[in-house]
């Protein structure tokens, strides 16, 4: 099979011929239809990054496809089933795994492989797709689930005033889920207005630029009130400090921006406001299922995040080009065809 292989940080992914993997007990082999390029794919292949992929691995964790082979003991899926798959697997028996939280398992391991024609997935961590959910839609389930967890951890509700900082796919997913939760006000903020319309499509009630007039614009947007919950999806140094400064007394900041650079903030100011700072990575199995159910119900606004699809052979050059600001939001890779 053809696959995009990580060799070392700062080096473009290499398209190689690899043997088709064989599913082990409890696993399935998925023929990959679509796989999204994530911001973490950029961060973990960048020169000088403190966190990188293992040399020789095939990245790609936002994928959908069809089951083409079953490992020993798999009865929950059949060959031909369309699925969206978790890119990780836990031990399957610990308390976290039994609760549908493989990211909380001490043995959690990444499988990934979506940047190849075939990928291995844990059968019990595959979400079968209803007839109304396409394989392209299903490639959005993973980033949408990240937003679902962030919003769940933020404990938002109809009375919540919400600020979302950073309009990458995770920030946009947080807007989408906050809108699903009926939040009375959702303000989107980013340095550039290029995704302001997209934020509105996902459910934001207003957009404000993060410029020199940001704090005044924020106060005006919330009618002099402070947001109850701030979702930090920027992933840049200083973003957490900004979020802590914006949130109201006894408010919550949920950070899922995945910044790999050194950062700092003054804890005393957060203590004085009694802020809760919550970090979020990944999701629960229920979040995954909720995303599929929302798409099946017709909440297909996330389709607007997809700006183009590319073939696997164009992935290395596309990944490098995405390091510079541009018009793309979510690019889907199609490993076959």
Image (tube, helix red, strand yellow):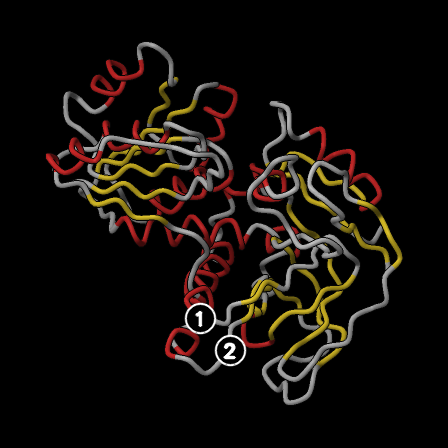
Residue 52: percent from left, percent from top: 61, 47
* Residue identified by numbered label 1: 105
Q: Is residue 113 left or right of residue 184?
A: right
Q: Give above or below for 74 relative to 182.
A: below
Q: Give above or below for 71 relative to 247.
A: below
Q: Nearer the viewer, residue 139 or 180?
A: 139
Q: Along the polypeptide, which appears first: circle 2 or circle 1?
A: 2
Residue 268 location, quadrant: top left
Give the SS element for disc 2. Answer: loop
Residue located farthest toward the bottom when viewing the structure as drawn: 73
Residue 31 location, quadrant: bottom right
How many marks can you see?
2
Residue 257 location, quadrant: top left
Q: Residues within 10 Å of mark 2 (few under 14, many from 20)?
A: some
Q: Residues within 10 Å of mark 1 (few under 14, many from 20)?
A: some
* Residue identified by numbered label 2: 91
Residue 77: percent from left, percent from top: 63, 79
Marks 2 & 1, CB-CB < 8 Å contact:
yes
Residue 75: percent from left, percent from top: 61, 87
Q: Nearer the viewer, residue 237 or 137?
A: 237
Compute the Cα span from label 2 to label 1.
Answer: 7 Å
Q: Identify the disc placed on residue 285.
A: none
Q: Residue at x 47, y 49 (%)?
A: 299
Q: Is residue 31 left or right of residue 159?
A: right
Q: Is residue 319 left or right of residue 144?
A: right
Q: Residue at x 59, y 33 (%)?
A: 329
């Amino acid at each position: 099979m053809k696959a995009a292989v990580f060799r070392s940080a700062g080096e473009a992914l290499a398209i190689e011929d690899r043997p088709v993997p064989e599913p082990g007990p409890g696993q399935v082999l998925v023929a990959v239809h679509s796989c999204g390029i994530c911001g973490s794919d950029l961060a973990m292949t960048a020169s000088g990054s403190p966190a990188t992929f293992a040399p020789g691995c095939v990245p790609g964790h936002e994928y959908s496809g069809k089951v083409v082979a079953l490992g020993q003991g798999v009865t929950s899926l059949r060959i031909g089933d369309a699925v969206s798959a978790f890119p990780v697997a836990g031990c399957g028996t610990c308390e976290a795994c039994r609760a549908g939280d493989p990211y909380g398992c001490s043995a959690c391991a990444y499988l990934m492989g979506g940047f190849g024609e075939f990928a291995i997935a844990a059968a019990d961590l595959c979400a079968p797709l209803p007839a109304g959910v396409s394989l392209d839609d299903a490639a959005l389930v993973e980033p949408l689930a990240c937003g679902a967890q962030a919003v769940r951890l933020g404990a938002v509700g109809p009375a919540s005033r919400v600020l979302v900082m950073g309009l990458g796919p995770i920030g946009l997913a947080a807007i989408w889920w906050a809108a699903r939760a009926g939040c009375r006000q959702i303000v989107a903020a980013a340095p550039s207005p290029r995704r302001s319309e997209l934020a509105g499509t996902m459910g934001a009630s207003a957009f404000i630029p993060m410029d020199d007039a940001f704090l005044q614009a924020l106060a005006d947007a919330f009618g002099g009130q402070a947001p109850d919950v701030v979702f930090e999806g920027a992933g840049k140094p200083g973003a957490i400090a900004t979020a802590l400064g914006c949130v109201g007394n006894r408010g919550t900041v949920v950070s899922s921006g995945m910044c790999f650079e050194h950062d700092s903030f003054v804890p005393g100011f957060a203590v004085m406001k009694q802020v809760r700072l919550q970090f979020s990575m990944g999701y629960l199995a229920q979040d995954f299922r909720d995303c599929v159910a929302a798409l099946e119900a017709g909440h297909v606004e996330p389709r607007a995040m997809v700006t183009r699809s590319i073939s696997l052979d164009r992935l290395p050059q596309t990944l490098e080009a995405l390091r510079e600001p541009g018009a793309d939001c979510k690019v889907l890779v199609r490993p076959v065809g």
